[in-house]
Image (cartoon, helix red, strand yellow):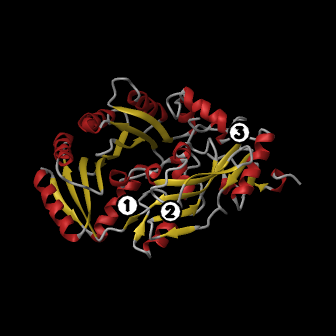
Amino acid sequence: MTVLQQGRAGSAGEAIDGVTPRLVAEPTSGEACAAVLAAAAAGRVPTVLRGSGTKSGWGRPLDAVDLVVSTKSLNNLLVHRDGDLTVTAGAGVTLARLNTTLSARGQWLPVDSAFVGTTVGGALATNDSGPLRQRFGTPRDLLIGITLALTDGRVVKSGGTVVKNVAGYDLGKLVTGSYGALAAIVDATFKLLPLPHASATLRALYTDPEPLAADAAAIAAGQFEPLAFDVRAADTADGPRWTLLVRFASSPAAVATQLDAARALVHGETTALREGLETRTWGEQVGLAWEGAATVVRCSWLPSRLGDVLALVRTLRGECGVTLTGRVGTGSGLLRLAGGDAAVAAAILSLRLDTSPVGHVVVLRGSRALRSHVDVWGAAPSAPAAALKRALDPTGILNAGRGPL
């Protein structure tokens, strides 16, 4: 019996973008995963890598899935080196389980995701991040080592298990954000952070975006070190509402000092959020763009152009419903576009104009009809990226054409 014949029939619950796979393989080790990929490459079987499936609808639409390689069984928390502030975890370990384990030693991996069940492999494959990006960056910035299964049957390691070890560092960074188009992630090693002793958030509400942009610029220019620094533009029962959120986490005294100093700079209606209310507010911020079934678009901008981005949001509201949740300090965020496919497609095209203040416009979620009409990625891969794809996946089986490579 061949490696692929050992796979089982796929189920509706394992569908990729609504398409049930013909075969599903669940390797229990890196070597087994590499053997499956090698067999798929030899037979030129289009293959999709799947973690918990929280982002299985992302990417270009497809008509058929021959093989899904699941990382479900690569779920061992391999080793927590609490003295070195590092951890190695299998690709199938969920972020929630990982951080529950780490918290017992007063540590955490500061990666926030809107999706319950997000795995280590899935977070890396999509470089998924949220408000914590302000202080800690994306998963790519926290990664220090990785184990990959390649389509030629090899299992390779890159990086190390301590923060100062940079041997082979780039391979992990290359596959992060590749959407499973280059190799299968077997396990990953991250640098960790101590859990903060105290946290509080300044929330400022505005009826117009201009003062919000001015206040955000004042805080950005100040001597602050926020854990998260976010903006929200959403429609409410009372009309459009613009919100600035600044979260501080450190010692209780440092948090209180920075909160008071930031409050003195802003002109909106301010509230200090702590404990449960703070947790709920940031939970809403992370998940807001994904509420309902609207289209979700990721984009970036120069932080200095926040005012132009907010003005663009106000303009787009003439075409469709728009909600923005974004990172002020890093210039990135999500737009939730509600409306018919034609109106949403027009909004996406306007976002991609040369005169638009935003760039790198990627459609993360949308109807199949929309994603068939508007290219999800918006641009063809660069020559170096295409060469990298050919080097690591010469038969082109990985991700079945869904990803950017």
Question: Could you tell me which residue is drawn at 62 percent across and 41 percent down?
Answer: 181
Tell me the amino acid under the disc marked 3.
Answer: Ile
Decide which of 159, 89 is in the foreground and name it.
Answer: 159
Tell me: 218 left or right of 46. Answer: left
Viewer-proximal residue among 174 and 272: 174
Q: Of tags 3 and 1, which is closer to the observer? A: 3
**Where is mark 1, residue-wise?**
283
Give the vertical position of 98 relative to 370 (above or below).
below
Q: Which mark is residue 95?
A: 2
Furthest-top residue in this view: 354
Look at label 2 and name its amino acid.
Leu
Q: Residue at x 51, y 45 (%)?
A: 173
What residue would you read off at disc 3?
A: 397
Residue 223 image position (x, y, % from top left) = 18, 52
Q: Is residue 36 above or below residue 191?
A: above
- The quarter of the rendered structure image containing the C terminus is top right
Q: Which mark is on residue 159?
A: none
Q: Quadrant of residue 41?
A: top right
Mark 3 and mark 1 lie on one chain; the one further toward the N terminus is: 1
Label 2 – label 1 distance at C-alpha: 15 Å
